[in-house]
Amino acid sequence: MSESTKVAVLGAGTMGHGIAQVCAAAGFTVHVSDPSEAARARGLEGVRASLDRMVGKAKMTAAQRDEVLGRIAWGGDLGAAVEDAGVVIEAVPERIELKRDLLQRVDALAPDSALLGSNTSSLSITELGSTLRDASRLVGLHFFNPVPVMELLEVVRGVRTSEATIDRALAFAARLPKTPIVVRDMPGFATSRLGVALGAEAIRMLEQGVASAEDIDRAMELGYRHPMGPLRLTDLVGLDVRLAILDHLHREVGEQFRAPPLLRQMVRAGKLGKKSGEGFYKW
Ligand code: CAA
């Protein structure tokens, strides 16, 4: 995977723009595709803010920031984004039909040699690949928020994912650089399954009045050295994202993943966490 490899990132949201940033910082040419102009503008602002923060901490120079920004193109045309791409990563909302339809379009438009990655946090890679001409080139490439900071890349092997695709995914991780783990295509993989279990239990504890949101978070921050408590983390990830994962795991794994009513109610009220300005905390 050479520096001239073009990476297409589909979706300019929280994960998409973070993925675009780390790919551009690693020297890749990046094209972010999102049909919403407003989402593209927010994505660009997100990348700029993150890079400015790094310049402020002397982790990069202003000139390097401008180079990284200059390597990312933003547009609404899927064909233009995936044309000549060596790697395509979809990072659109966590709905199977949305991701499957998009990947099917990519399958027709991207070069046959392109590696196809899905940033899904819980959906089946095998199912996402079921309608592709060649499912052997699809792999889960699961990043973590904030993408520029988090070290892990969870690489998910679908039933049809080839060994060569896993090798390419590992080489890609090394270039970013991220530390990969390879997991089987089971609902919630390794990270989301454990992450939402803790988050959901914290919400149930809040419902039961065990302690305040702040103190439930402090329990894990000070008692277990988590960098951030489970409720604040749910705000960071997005309550809607966590609810979608829980509903999926509830269907696929069982009762222990039934979403707490409080979470569903908050999502219905538009309290989605940091991105909407309010979740378990005000932002
Ligand atoms: N861009 C660039 N740098 C950033 C950044 C960003 N968006 N966010 C934080 N940083 C940098 C800061 O500048 C700071 O740098 P220095 O160490 O050089 O000072 C460093 O990261 C730490 O940040 P802060 O000092 O602001 O605050 P912190 O120490 O509390 O760390 C945090 C913030 C990194 C977010 C930390 O709280 C943390 O690790 N939280 C847990 C995050 C987590 O669990 N993410 C996974 C969520 S699950 C997911 O994403 C997957 C899914 O499928 C839903």
Image (cartoon, grey):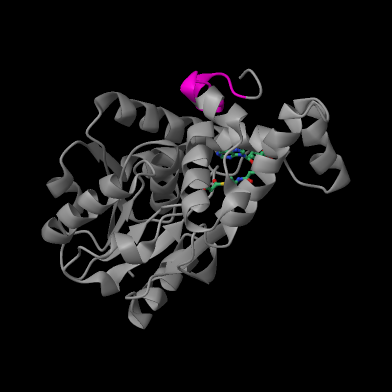
Residue 150 lies in magenta, yes or no? no
The residue lying toward the viewer, choosing from 77 and 208, is 208
Tell me which segment is drawn in magenta.
Answer: 268-279
Q: Quadrant of the N terminus?
A: bottom left
Magenta stretch, overall SS = loop
Residue sitting at 65 percent across and 41 percent down? 200
Q: How many marks?
A: 0
- Left/right placement of residue 261 relative to residue 222 reads left
User: Can you say whether 140 is above or below 60 in the image?
Assistant: below
Quadrant of the rendered structure where residue 114 is? bottom left
Q: In the displayed orientation, state which residue is furthest to the front.
A: 255
Residue 23: image location, x then y, percent: 40, 53
The residue lying toward the viewer, choosing from 283 and 264, is 264
Residue sitting at 44 percent across and 35 percent down? 47
- Left/right placement of residue 95 relative to residue 79 reads right
- Left/right placement of residue 242 relative to residue 18 reads right
Residue 208: image location, x then y, percent: 76, 29
Residue 76: image location, x then y, percent: 19, 36
Residue sitting at 14 percent across and 47 percent down? 80
- Left/right placement of residue 211 relative to residue 199 reads right
Is residue 272 visible to us here?
A: no
Whereabouts is ligand 1, in terms of quadrant?
Answer: top right
